[in-house]
Image (cartoon, grey):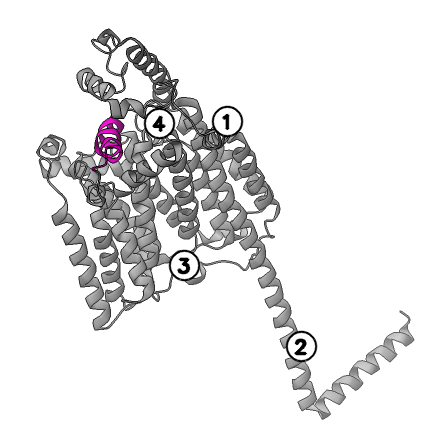
Amino acid sequence: MTQCENSVSTQQGFDRVRALDLAPTSFVQAMKRADAAAATDRAGKTAARCAGWTRSLSLAVAGVFLLALASKLFLVHFAASQVPFYDEWDGEAAAVIKPFLEGHFSVADLFQHDNEHLIFFTRLLTILDLKISGYWDVLPLMIFNAFLHATTLALGLWTLTRPLAGPRAMAALLFGCGLAVIPFGHESALMGFNTHFYTLIAFSLAALWLLADARAWSGRWFCGVLMAAGAYLSMASGALAPATAAGLALVQFWRGARSGLAEALAIVALLIMSALFVALTPSVPENAAFHAHSLSSFLFGLLDLLAWPVRVKFGAVLYLPGLAFALALLRDAPRRADPRWFNLGVLAWVLVQMAALSFGRNGALYSRYLDFCVVGLFANIVSALWLAPRLDGFLNRRRFVALALATSAILAALAGANHGRVMKIHAITERRDDSRIQEARLRAYLATGGSAALIGKGRFDIPYPSADRLKAFLDDPTIRATLPPDLNPTQRVHPLVEGIKSSLLSFWWLFLLAGLAAWGAAVLRLPSPDRGMSGNGARGSFRIF
């Protein structure tokens, strides 16, 4: 630009200023229009970024479901067999299949207790499985359980991450996915009869999700009450689901998120419901030996459960993020619709379940109970990430991939730790080998009728603790007629049912590939980090007090 051109340009600028001075209204209107345009542009970029995070998070949730399902189907394909195992002989054959086929099974029998538990849905699915398969087949129940648990984990994680901004929600889903694919609860996964463990978790989380922000006596509230009843119809500790929801509502009442007589009466109704369920739960004298008989044994059992998966004296510090999250929530006292209330309810539910387990089973850390502990880890991971808002501007594609690799390495080390606190890999291989031995021995007995195939063998050489009782099952004509083809080669099968079952188990790797593809797409769609995207939305901040 020449000096002349610069002078002309400068003069034109002074002319514009003088024009604005003479017409201030026009200037203000122009500035307003500019501000409105800038705000619209920012809103558009924010909406686009939010849409990007929504797509990425949706794909990540799908990835959690698919990878968890692939892991469970592979486990069933690798280690399971059609031979019923331990509780399945009493809980399915004697209590359901025999009376159902002989015509003296009534609707009331669905509500009979098995030990302290009602297991309504387990009995219902056993009958449905019998009608569909045409014989007693435990594998379809294992497949159903795999789908149910994978769905519960994925949706539960998605719901727990609602208080988090996009980057931290993705990190939480990544950590949660890693935990979901490790078969901590392999005992339940390899027993079709254990559906009630999974329905307890599913109905309890659904009840808390519905009741956490439901207006008292609304349609949503009644749906939550039905879900809480479903938890009780699954296992005895489900009786505490309404009490947990009532406790959450009471805290909301205290912090001003609820008010009025209707809300107070709803809390009382939930407490009465829980008390009724507890009163209806029978006391089984034979189980008294498993109870905690002193306050110290109860507390030590509870602390041991809270410390899982580590084995240290003060392992319960794993729940400190949840405690800090709860204190911050109580400080903020948000509205009833705030999603953090659900997270607080889940933390409370896990603690209640662990307390029940510590009392009823003296804190036993059997594999079948570890799925409850995993939910507790989910909630604490989300709590820790909620307390770290600076991660929002840190995570990008490259760092997320690095985080995924680090998480995989940590979880691989965790899965490879062959001690009972985590997962005994050799226990899974032993279960597979035992099932092959059990199948061979039962086939030999059914072919020859010789008791030598059952008597005097090792503990897991036969699929029931008592050889005499097992022999009575096998000699019963009604039960023998329903035995699966692996034990009864003359059993008639439905080709379509067998084809679907075989395909789901044999092609588990397709779910694995689909899950990896979903995660890959989620990472590729990650929006650019927003440096101004800090805090927790309806979520508060890092400060606790």
Asked whether the residues under the numbered discs 1 and 4 touch, taking CB atoms below 8 Å apart as contact, a structural biologist would say: no
What is the distance, in whole Å, between disc 1 and disc 4 at their CAs?
24 Å
Question: Would you say the magenta stretch is mainly helix, strand or loop?
Answer: helix
> Is residue 138 visible to us here?
yes
Q: Where does label 3 land, which residue?
A: 541
Asked whether the residues under the numbered discs 2 and 3 touch, taking CB atoms below 8 Å apart as contact, a structural biologist would say: no
Relative horizontal placement of residue 73, taking residue 105 as reference (left or right):
right
Say if 76 sits above or below 241 in the image: above
**Residue flagged by tag 2: what amino acid is it?**
Ala
Q: In the rendering, at what x and y percent does residue 397 appear? A: 59, 44
What is the distance, in whole Å, between disc 4 and disc 3 at their CAs?
36 Å
Span of residues in magenta:
86-104
Q: Where does label 2 land, which residue?
A: 34
What is the distance, in whole Å, between disc 1 and disc 2 at their CAs?
62 Å
Q: Where does label 1 land, which residue?
A: 506
Q: Secondary structure at mark 3?
A: loop
Residue at the limit of the structure toward the front, as seen here: 103
Which of marks 2 and 1 precedes in the sequence?
Answer: 2
What is the number of callouts on the image?
4
Which of marks 3 and 1 precedes in the sequence?
Answer: 1
Relative horizontal placement of residue 18, taking residue 293 as reference (left or right):
right
**Residue flagged by tag 4: what amino acid is it?**
Met
Q: Secondary structure at mark 1?
A: helix
Which of marks 4 and 1 precedes in the sequence?
Answer: 4
Q: Residue at x 47, y 41 (%)?
A: 65
Residue neighbourhood size for the residue with mark 3, other residues' Cα within 10 Å, grouped as few (<14), some (14–19), many (≥20) = some
